[in-house]
Image: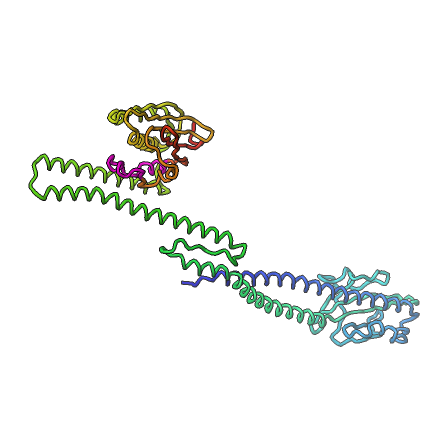
Amino acid sequence: MMRRLSLTATLAIAFGCTTLAVFIAVGGFVYEALEQRIAAQDDLDIVLAARHARRLTDELNTLSGIEEHEERLESIVLGNQALYMKVADAQGHVLLTHNVRKEDTAPPPATGPGLAPATIMQATARITTGSIAQWTDADGEPVRGIVTLATLRDNSTAMLLIARRMTDRVALLDRYRDTLKAAGVAGVLFSAALGYVLIWLSLKPLRAISERSKNVTVAKLDARLALEHVPVEFVSLVNALNAMLARLETGFQHMQRFTADLAHDMRTPVSNMRGAMEVALARPRSTEDYEQLLASNVEECDRLSRMIENVLFLARAEHPQFVRHMQAFDVGDELARMSEYFEGLADEAGIAIRATGGGRLTADVELFRRAVGNLLANAIRHTPRNGSVELSSRETPDGLQVSVFNQGALVPDAELERIFDRFYRGDPSRNLASGSTGLGLAIVRAIMELHGGSARAVRDEQGMRFVLLFPVRSLL
């Protein structure tokens, strides 16, 4: 398996590649600018020398004057070993040479790429840099120059060749290019190494965060990452990690409490059944006693079944893929149906149920019924005889609100937020006697969260009101 590069090495390589690209771009630009500057300067020297040579030749009376003024003509290219001059008559007889080697030849008469429009310029043509031709000598070395005619005072014609060997320029540019390459390679290696060191130092706070994260264990979920000496770029990361640790700590504590409460609540009915059976087995019992024992055990089994079913529902409701069957329905009809369903239980407790309000809602009907049913069962359980339970619904700017109000015992303000926690019981003895599992209100909150709504409890002087708020998007 190929080893993955570290972030430091990856950034250093990227930094080196960026530097290489910059070196190539800058080096290429500088090389091209230097090459053009040297070529322009050399072409200017050739043009000036050709103009001067033709002007001096035009001032001579005869071709023999060329030999007489040899020094004057040679002075035009004197001092530059790369420049050379050749003067010939119309028949091609050489009259004067300076710094000419045997391999130096004039350019071919035909025009082509890199050559001037006319290889041999007429005596009346203006000499410019565009008149310069380029060719190679017998040794294959590049040469740039001008061949022009000059008309003497006796109307005789002389051919002038002013040329420059470009070998030294080619060598100079080659050395410069090699120097740029060497400097570029060295610069890239140096920048990559320097970038690696700087990046490694810059990532030191991240390594420190990683080391401090090792202190976070199951036994130390309260540990937090310190913000001291943390760069600004890592502050949001540290805050996010600390927030995640806080959520994990809260969730772990919640799970511990839930596990402890679940174990305690499941142990109670099992202990009750075991104790009753041990008492029954202590001595012979009548058939009636055994029937009572079995009936009691069935009640405890029903309680365990309800508890297990509720726990499984809460576990499924927390899963992101929990399936909901959304449909539109009339809330008033559902509330009337729920009040009729609980009417028998309410009559036994001497309690009256009243359902009012209406509205239309898009939600899971079965979950809606379960949430309202849990609230009604809880209200009936805590309402004194001859009391009443009011079930109502209405549309508000925030959404559709369903409330269940019951008279009776009030929950202290300090416990209003905990009333929807799992296994919460304000009066444990009474709840145990009534068969409550302590999960009904927790299921109500889970159902509302599935619908994007909320559940809350409000107390006043007359009793308790439980409010379910479905979001605006659920309204029709």
Query: Is there any visible trace of residue 366 in the rendered image?
Result: no
**Residue at position x 83%, y 66% in the image:** 48
At 58% from the left and 65% from the top, the residue drawn is 191
Residue 190 higher or lower than 393, as above or below: below
Q: Which residue: 11% across, 41% down?
A: 280
Place of residue 202 in the rendered image (x, y in percent of width and height, measured from the top left)? 53, 61
Say which quarter of the image contains residue 176: bottom right
Q: Looking at the picture, does residue 424 appear above or below residue 115?
A: above
Q: Is residue 286 left or right of residue 210?
A: left
User: Which secondary structure dominates the residues rendered in magenta?
Assistant: helix
Image: magenta residue range: 425-447
Quadrant containing the C terminus in the rendered view:
top left
Front residue of this view, candidates 113 and 144 = 144
**In the image, 363: left or right of 164?**
left
Q: Position of residue 444 (x, y in %)?
A: 34, 35
- Tell me the residue at 10%/43% (across/down): 281
Which image quadrant for residue 305?
A: top left
Q: Within the image, what quadrant is residue 136 found in? A: bottom right
Q: Relative to 249, does residue 86 appear above or below in the rendering? A: below
How is colour applied across the structure in the image? rainbow
